[in-house]
Amino acid sequence: MRFFSSKKKPAGTNDLMKTTNEKSRAVFHELKVKDIRRQTDECVSVAFDLPDNLHQDYRFFPGQYLTLRTNINGEDVRRSYSICSCPFEEDLRVAIKKLDGGVFSTFANEELKVGDVLKVMTPEGNFHTPISEQNKKQYVAFAAGSGITPIMSIMKTVLRNEPNSTFSLFFGNRTSNSIIFRDEIDELKNVYMNRLEVHHILSREDQGSDFTRGHIDGVKVEAFSRSFFNPADVDEFLICGPEDMIRNIDESLKSLGVSKEKIHFELFTTSTEVVGQKQKAKSSGETSGNVSKITVLLDGEETHFDLAYDGKSVVDAAMDAGADVPFSCKGAVCCTCRARVIEGEVEMDMNYALEPEEVEDGYILTCQTHPRSPTVKISYDE
Ligand code: FES
């Protein structure tokens, strides 16, 4: 079966691109590994076979990610990885960079084989902008290391589906050998010569210019803006990399007059510093010793359990009670555990994934949620 087809459908009308109002609850399906490609010494990309009956479920926006799940040494491990292919290609593919001590990433880089079966969650994530053939936009992206993955998907889609848009990529790596998708990016530069500009910034290799040496930070972004783009002319800024880099660039762009609506970033992990900025949903004072009666609604079925105000998160307690609730990062980042409070009061420890309007509408990240009233009813079905 062909999953993606670039030849049969004209740009902008590919039915594998998720439509804006397409929303469904994330669920796992077992998918067979179709291909494993070594991208660098420390990174592989993994493609999955999609049976016809699951084709629709795995439609995605460029920039979204898949959560992979498997048993490694007796432990149920799940991790999220951004999709690096785009909706018109023939692959549903993620890139997995090996991290020091990373259980899943080491397994994927060293043990995973073609034909193995993994549990793969349907695509999730909010890191994307609407793609349209009518767009005439200027995109500027800053990526570091494996942060290129979602940007690669967006960049390929924009270049192919928006013939009047331009894309500038500033890509930070240690050395030229550690550049993920180096050949593919070079090919794109050849195909889209007049619309794609790529700047490699290397921290451990001297390319003979201050512009291209070191790490991408706010100071560099200001320097880039004097030479390569006018911030006022750029329609969308995309940032993906370590949290410090994201914060630094975000501040720098704002100081250059860029409005926050134009800045999109993908945060993979959180640091303790950011934890201090936790966003509260609703709070009602004392927590110690109180217990709440929780009802969780999932696929129309109710699960009931008691939960202490200062106990586990709703998602952990719901799993203990036997509900197969969705989650991935458990760090307030990915939004997979999103649900809505139907009744009662709750409090979230952290929130980096929900928009203020969603919180206002009662949406919560259940991996961060604790009860604050005697009864609470939460629905994953809304
Ligand atoms: S599991 Fe990722 S935000 Fe809750």
Image (cartoon, helix red, strand yellow):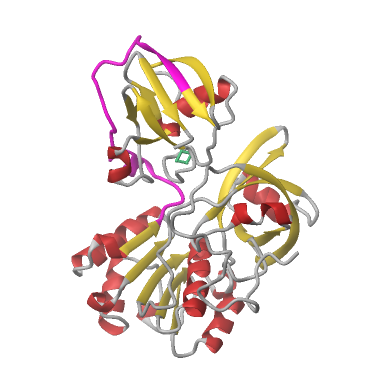
Quarter of image, res 49: bottom right
Residue occupying image coordinates x 78% and y 54%: 113
Where residue 74 sits: x, y (%)?
A: 72, 32
Query: Quadrant location of residue 203?
Result: bottom left
- The residue under the point 28% across, 33% down is 280
Q: Report the residue that reaches farthest toward the top.
A: 289
Which secondary structure type mostly characterizes the magenta part of the structure?
loop
Q: Is residue 282 left or right of residue 269?
A: left
Image label count? 0
Q: Is residue 174 visible?
A: no
Q: Is residue 105 magenta?
A: no
Q: Is 82 placed above or below 308 here? A: below
Please report the residue visible at 38 percent of the width from the left and 24 percent of the height from the top. 370
Foreground residue among 377 and 326: 377
Q: Observer-nearest residue: 332 or 162? A: 162
Instruction: Indicate whether residue 277 is drawn in magenta.
Output: yes
Q: Which residues are magenta?
A: 266-295
Question: Residue 350 appears at what percent x and percent y?
Answer: 35, 37
What residue occupies the far right of the structure in this picture?
115
Q: Foreground residue, 314 or 98?
A: 314
Q: Is residue 275 left or right of residue 171?
A: left
Query: Residue 135 at what x, y percent from top left?
Result: 38, 77
In which quadrant of the rendered image does the C terminus lie?
Answer: top left
Q: In this view of the protein, which residue sits in the foreground, 82 or 219?
A: 82
- The residue at 43%/58% (across/down) is 127
Residue 212 appears in the picture as rendered: yes
Quarter in which the N terminus is drawn: bottom right
- Up/down of 374 relative to 152, above or below: above
Q: Position of residue 362 (x, y in %)?
A: 33, 34
